[in-house]
Amino acid sequence: MRLIIDTDTAGDDVFSLMLALRRPDVTVEAITISHGNVGFEQHAENALVTLEACGRAGEVPVYMGAQRPFTRQPLDAAYVFGADGMSDAAFPRTTQRPAPGHAADEIVRRVMKAPGEITLIAQAPLTNIALAYLREPRIAQAVKHLWIMGGTDNGVGNVTPAAEYNLYVDPEAAKIVVNAGFPMTIVTWTETLRDGLLDLEQLAALDALGTSRARFFTQVNKASLAFAQETEHLDGSLHPDALTCALALDERLILEAEMAVVDVETMGELTRGYLSVSNHILPDIEVADPALKRRPPNARVIKRIDRDGFYQALRNALL
Ligand code: RIB
Ligand code: CA
């Protein structure tokens, strides 16, 4: 499998990268960096540190992308991940540096060079992916599959009641991407709350592996674990990006999914970044309001996964 991962590397983004980097049958062709969780430059540092932690330093290029959303002010989530996005670990600067070239151009170049070959995982605000599509719309047909971590599935968001972070931060980009015609699967925050929690027993078992990567995991996960426990009152930590990557790497972990019509709200006063997901209990849309047009489903939305399989995938990455 050939992958490009677009990431605002901090916290769980790191574990998603680890899952892919530790699989011998997966080629991570490039890591592309977005604005998002913490400082833009820091995301690249975190991705580079992760390559080192996985014994892959110098093997995977890291490209810098969009430093801000299309029209909105940037918005970080350092309150979840610590100022450096790594639970304030202060890892030393790596020898590998970001590669020259813009992330969006690299996505276009690599996807168009190998049509039907490259799977794209988008685990940050969707600015880089939207830019890539605007530069070369044919990537929507040339990508093997686009996996998006983002939105809620008629559930509760993590920034506002309506919106999940990645879509809230750059709703205009998200709207472009979900309407672009990519073959697409979405792992929502709703699904993360359902199946993306590692409980305290699992976290202790991962730490007890005692490997350098297990220690790295425990260190990086500290801040989000504390946030989940203290603010979200959960008995463990949440792993939206790792969950997305695990499913992309092994679709057998998907137990239930539904094709849906999805779109993103950009205008709403209270619903900025809301992911609208159709549902089979809704009436045919033109019956409910003849002014609405029926649209074909444009995304697969994950509903249930093999939780133990997800845990085992993460465990294997830390061995
Ligand atoms: O809402 C979860 C997403 O936003 C993840 O990609 C995580 O990195 C975050 O801040
Ligand atoms: Ca992310």
Image: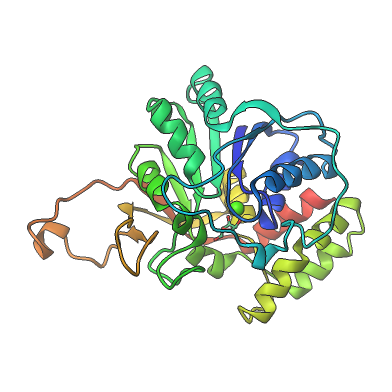
Quadrant location of residue 210?
Answer: bottom right
Decide: is 269 above or below 62.
below
Q: Which residue sits furthest front?
A: 73
In the picture, measured across the screen, residue 221 lies left or right of residue 264, that is right
Quadrant location of residue 101?
Answer: top right
Query: Which of 183 and 133 lies nearest the eye of the viewer?
Result: 133
Ligand 1, image quadrant it occupies? bottom right
Query: Which of 309 and 127 lies nearest the eye of the viewer?
Result: 127
In the picture, measured across the screen, residue 313 lies left or right of residue 176, that is right
Q: Position of residue 251 (x, y in %)?
A: 55, 47
Q: Which residue sits furthest left?
A: 290
Q: Position of residue 191 (x, y in %)?
A: 51, 64
Decide: is 287 above or below 138.
below
Q: Position of residue 285 (x, y in %)?
A: 16, 59
Quadrant position of the N terminus in the picture: top right
In the picture, measured across the screen, residue 173 lies left or right of residue 226, that is left
Colouring chosen for the image of the structure: rainbow
Residue at image location 51% in from the left, 50% down from the top: 125
Q: How many marks?
A: 0
Query: Which of 74 and 200 lies nearest the eye of the viewer?
Result: 74
Residue at image location 60% in from the left, 34% down from the top: 4
Residue at image location 9% in from the left, 56% down from the top: 291
Q: Position of residue 215 (x, y in %)?
A: 87, 58
